[in-house]
Amino acid sequence: MSPASLPSSLPHFVAFFFVLSSLWAFPMAVASSDHRKHADVTRHYNFHITLKNITRLCNTKSIITVNGKFPGPRIVAREGDRVLIKVVNHVPNNVTIHWHGIRQLRSGWADGPSYITQCPIQSNQSYVYNFTIIGQRGTLFWHAHISWLRATVYGPIVILPRRNDSYPFPKPHKEIPIIFGEWWNADTEAVINQAQQTGGGPNVSDAYTINGLPGPLYNCSQNDTFRLKVKPGKTYLVRLINAALNDDLFFSIAKHTLTVVEADAVYVKPFDTDVLLITPGQTTNVLLKTKRHYPPNDTNFLMLARPYSTGLGTFDNSTVAGVLEYDNPSNHDHHNSSSLSSKNQTVVLLKPTLPQINDTSFAANFSSKLRSLAISKFPANVPKTVDKRFFFTVGLGTNPCPRNQTCKGPTNRTKFAASVNNVSFALPSTALLQAHFFGRANGVYTTDFPSFPLRPFNFTGIAPNNTNVSSVSSGTKVVVLPYNASVELVMQDTSILGAESHPLHLHGFNFFVVGQGFGNYNSTTDPAKFNLVDPVERNTVGVPSGGWVAIRFLADNPGVWFMHCHFEVHMSWGLRMAWIVRDGKLPNQKLLPPPSDLPKC
């Protein structure tokens, strides 16, 4: 700014200075000059990791939050924007943040999983996550990616279309994020630490939450209820996010049909449903069309979510409720919106019907309805040919109990474990991406992750007697891919310790779900049934309980990319692995250098 353009009086200057300084106190959007070719706008956010006392279920505890909010603040950007988020750690715990579903093209340093793409942000340290949103629009979310901190450290990411672009569906009257979570009265770090020591399953959560609130079906939670107030004859875009730690969830709203229009920030062919299924790590956008007229006075509609579970282990078998209420002006005089009853009469609460807890057929039918929009503006670029084929078993297993210790695994001589192709992945003590970029893999990781199971068996039949995860093959093993290779990966559930649905999340890529089925995958007959025309494109997919799923993706993003079960308990037990994608030959096919403030281990 030139001297001639400065405010001419002191009061004006003070006001000007206040406005300027406040821009940095709150999220902002400014035109980017040096990144103009790549980003339309640069948006700045400040994330302060702090402790805050929160009360739920009449239990008050200190939790880790972002900016003292639970859930955390919403990130809003447009396709093409550059986003800079400064994370400052004010708590004793190490912290990282993952921007779940953001492609991070050539910017893997900003992906966030601890010891994969970065060392943690230590107490009293900071790190700026810097990435550009390329070719994506829709709903994603961010969460902590170290230990079990994401139990309270999470929030929505809303990516709007480019300015002057529109949705491929009618413009909604209003947009509402709904983020599912889990609440423990206990400290979740103590929960997983105790489980790791004893080898048993961790204690389950005490409640599920909608936007951080448990709702009226839980003890002491009548006033901690999420309420969605709507007007009749309107269409609302509801952005659903499952940030729960360990549970797939069914969701429904009484007497209302939902139209699914997007999954994992990719548009899908719209379809109507009364109930939807969403795994941890998945997002689903739905259109909610309200009734044409106000319902009878004091009639509200419950929205319910409860788990879909097929495993043998214990889980939180409870239901979270929110309330959909029509904002009828004639009710304002006598209706107490903070309660489920008014002074004169009890509110009528209509409940939806949800599937059975273990309804695998509903899960299969629902997932089969998801298809890419596959139009010229939003094509489904499915790899038609395959350069690299992989077959991964995913499931549970055991490790021997240490000598002179009694464990609480499946037997008192074993501990729970989990693996991919019988490899239980061990996190290194330094970040894989740094080791890869600087050519220091020796002693950090090896490149011999098996492409196929080393010892095939009847994966979904009677489990073998030996359920131990191989001590020989476990460790920090990765798969190395050449740049731009087309990859087909079949993930097969196993019946070891019980068949179970596993939500597998791949960092750095979207993939196409080209096929799925129950039983053992048949490499001779099943590929003929693959959908290579309009398969759904997403970043997290549920491997069917007692079945398999086939995905394809193009390895067009150089770096190190984590893939893991999004059940936090299974990831803690080792159900995780990593891919390394080599640089391409051209400058725009290479991983960018690390930022100067990258945390050190």
Image (spheres, grey):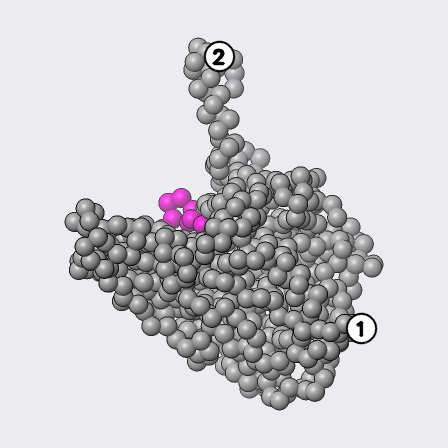
Question: Could you tell me residue 596's position as x and y percent?
Answer: 70, 39
370 relative position to 104: left or right: left
Characterize the local packing of mark 1: few (<14), some (14-19) or many (20 or more) Cα atoms within 10 angstroms: few
317 relative position to 171: left or right: right
Query: Which callout, 1 or 2, points at the residue further toward the start of the chain?
Result: 2
Please provide the residue range marked out in magenta.
Answer: 158-166
Q: Amino acid at mark 2?
A: Ala
Rendered image quadrant of residue 558: bottom right
Question: Could you tell me residue 5's position as x and y percent?
Answer: 47, 15
Q: Is residue 423 magenta?
A: no
Question: What SS does tag 1 mark?
Answer: loop
The outermost residue toward the right is 442
Tell me the residue at 78%/64% (across/down). Answer: 446
Question: What SS does tag 2 mark?
Answer: helix
Marks 1 & 2, CB-CB < 8 Å contact: no
Q: Amino acid at mark 1?
A: Asn
Q: Taking the image as drawn, is residue 62 in sight?
A: yes
Q: Main secondary structure of the magenta part?
A: loop
Q: Which residue is mark 2?
A: 4
The outermost residue toward the bottom is 462
6 relative position to 253: left or right: right
How many angstroms separate mark 1 from mark 2 (CA)?
A: 80 Å
Q: Is residue 510 above or below residue 387?
A: above
Q: Is residue 162 magenta?
A: yes
Characterize the local packing of mark 2: few (<14), some (14-19) or many (20 or more) Cα atoms within 10 angstroms: few
| Of marks 1 and 2, the one in the foreground | 1
Q: Which residue is mark 1?
A: 404
Rendered image quadrant of residue 427: bottom right
